Amino acid sequence: MNRRKKLVFISSIAVPHQVRFCDALEDYFDTRLWFYEYPDRTRGAWWRVDLGKHCKVLERVVFLESGLFAERYLALGLRKELEQFDPDIVMVGGFSIPSNYLAYRWARRKRKKTIVFSERSRDPSGGLRRRGLVWGLLHWLYRDVDVVMVNADDAVAQFRDDLGFGDKVVAGRYAADLEAYFEHPLREAKLAYTYLFANRMTEIYNPIGAIELFAAVRSKYPGSRLVMNAAGELGEQCRARIAELGIGDAVEFLTKLKSWNELHKVYARCDILILPANFSNGNFTILEAMASGMGVVVSDRVLGIGKMVEDEKNGFNCEPTTAAFLNRIERYLQQPKLFRVHAEINRPLVEPLSARGTARFFFDTVTRRFGCHDKRD
């Protein structure tokens, strides 16, 4: 019997989605997932989960803040870690992290297979970046990479054509931690509903717009409640706007979460996700709401995952105005059967994006490229 291939995936932050993905990949590879830092600095300590025996945060990591490699990390002991594990496949998350390049060079010297996983590359104005000096250099540095896996279908053309990686580019995705959400009960008709704004209070997600929308809902449907993410630089402005609108007694900020495993319970007690974003590359919050069986109303300016929500088919997708969102919300209120209709479409739709579904997808993709062995029994 052929041994399972050894795979190491080097990622930035030890977020729960990646840890769950590592666990799922164990069905296919002898997997290790190494991170440069815990989530405490950027997400909060409640994002920490048990890393298990196959994940770990690397020691002796230096944080860099300037130059071409403005992003990030240099792990001083990485070469030793690679030598000890001796993976067959080295996968790194991002082109512009110094230690990722060092891992790539180690893999090339050892004649290992190499994968770079990347998100869309955007310029300061939010447009897709074209090949210039920086990407010309990155392309040269990674000229012998075996596969460039991008996080969404619409990023394939950018990396294949504009950034010059050609047929090495394949569509991939992040894994979402969804299993607990599938167990939530379907929403039913009730006198008043609870709305969830799950994204950070930052400009692109338009939290002020969400608050004003909720105020309009509350004025027509007393007893309605809003649950909001408590993080983000617009927190003070949001609280001030809530006070101005006199809806403070109906708004709950998520300040008491103690662990990641509590998060899905927030969705379970909410009914409709609202995301009137001015822009977004796509958010796991949408997948989580769909898996939970919630009603979903998202802005038509949300890319990626947002495009999975088709207006009037499995949720509502519209311009991010109070009038448009209120119109869609009232469809759920007037036709509560839509909760069940949409949930029955959405749960099978998002299952392939779960940790297990993404692991299957990843194995199939790697098998086509590298000719790996079968899944273990």
Image (spheres, rainbow, N blue to C red):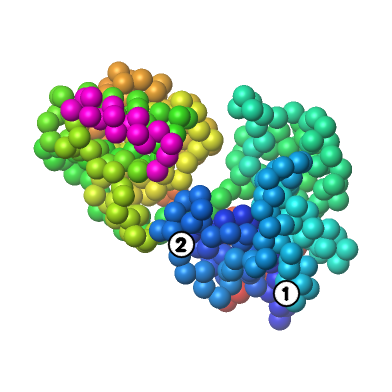
- Picture quadrant where residue 181 is located: bottom left
Residue type (three-letter) at the residue carrying disc 2: Arg
The residue indicated by pointer 2 is 48
Label 1 sits on a secondary structure element that is helix
For the residue marked with disc 1, what is the amino acid?
Phe
Range of magenta residues: 231-246
Q: Is residue 374 above or below residue 343?
A: below
Q: x and y percent of residue 49 in the render?
A: 45, 65
Residue drawn 80% across the image and 30% down it: 132
Q: Residues within 10 Å of mark 1 (few under 14, many from 20)?
A: few
Residue 220 belongs to the span the image colors magenta: no
Question: Considering depth in this image, is 58 or 275 the residue closer to the camera?
Answer: 58
Above or below residue 136? Residue 369 is below
The alpha-carbon separation of the residues under discs 1 and 2 comes to 25 Å
Query: Which of labels 1 and 2 is toward the front?
Result: 2
* Identity of the residue furthest to the bottom in this view: 1
Classify residue 11 as left or right of residue 187: right
User: Is residue 253 in view?
Assistant: yes
* Residue 370 in the figure: left or right of residue 223: right
